[in-house]
Image (tube, rainbow, N blue to C red):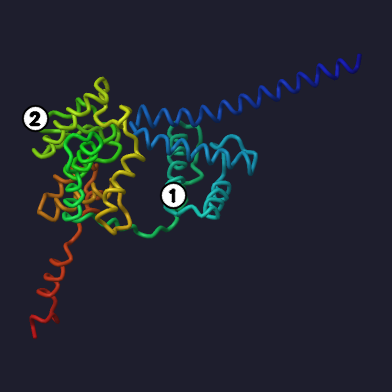
Amino acid sequence: MYFFVFLIRATYVLRCFEQRLFIDNTRRILSITHFINYLDCERNYSPYTIIAYNKDLLTFQEFCDKEFEIKEISTVPYNIIRSWIINLVESKISNRSINRKISSLKSYFNFLLKSKQIEESPLRKHQSLKVEKRINVPFSEKEINEVLDFFDSEDDFEQVRDKLIIELFYTTGMRRAELIGLKESSIDLSQGIVKVIGKRNKERQIPLLNSVRSTIDNYRFLKKDIAPLTDHLFVTKKGAQIYPNLVYRMINDYFGKVSLKVKKSPHIVRHSFATHLLNEGADLNSVKELLGHSSLASTQVYTHSNLKDLKLMYNQAHPRSNKNH
């Protein structure tokens, strides 16, 4: 008799424990889910940014659970976050990547503050780790032209597609995610423009050069046999939408044949677009609009002085230059 009473009580306690565990897990999942929905629906963050934020938060949650048996990260004190930072440093993760992860966490706590779920952010006094200033060296006009000279076929689907991708990067300055997201309806050849959906779903229109419009016509003609029904502008040879790694590898492979620069990526082609325009006297505000930047501070990163012109100015202006001897 006593055994059965004990068994019933034990079963009840176990069920209560399981129910509490389920509720705790549901709460912490919902907390992050609400934040991700907020980024998507209210802040209009890009899918890639949302994926990165979600991954950072879940990684931190796993760390808290494993190392401290803390299941609700909204309540963690700063010393726990500091332990995570130390763990990331010891894992040989770069300071730049760690700062990005902490930025995700800081945004999450700011969301909790805004929704009055917490009264104070544990990261309010946190200082970012020091990082070396990264200098992205743009491709030269010669390197760009040499890469475009590789494409001598007008009936090979992948060659024409890759040529168009490089031409669009270099002549519009769009981001990789923006290019991947282009639809057939994004191109308006009658107006000579491409409509780009940038960060936070902001649309901008960028002019198309006549040479690019010609490549678009040829690409569309070849694409009809590959993927006649899809609205995605760029597809693989199997008809699926292209993806980030494919674009990165393609740019890296082509430019690796003509350039010794360490960094060879879609962003460097975008960087080259802005730099070459500014070097030719383009207005900074106009370049800002083309790039889809929200402030001039972001665009000013691309304002490089030509070394030859810099030396000329230096020799002409400095009191002890040779011109005075």
Which residue was labeled with disc 2?
191
Viewer-side label of 2, 1: 2
Q: Alpha carbon of mark 2 to alpha carbon of mark 1: how far?
A: 42 Å
Q: Going by the image, does 55 lie left or right of 190?
A: right
Please name whichever residue, 148 or 261, is drawn nearer the observer in this view of the structure.
148
Please name the residue shown 38% across and 37% down the image: 49
Q: Residues within 10 Å of mark 2 (few under 14, many from 20)?
A: few
Q: Which of marks 2 and 1 is nearer the N terminus?
A: 1
Question: The disc labelled 1 sits on which kind of residue?
Answer: Ser
- Is 19 positioned to the left or the right of 77 in the image? right
The quarter holding residue 23 reads top right
Which residue position is annotated with label 1?
97
The local crowd at label 1, few if under 14, some if 14 to 19, many if 20 or more residues have their Cα within 10 Å, is: some
Side of 90 where 202 appears, left or right: left
Residue 41 x, y percent position in the rendering: 36, 27
Residue 236 at what x, y percent from top left? Answer: 30, 32
Q: Residue 25 appears at what percent x and percent y?
A: 59, 28
Residue situated furthest bottom in the rendering? 325
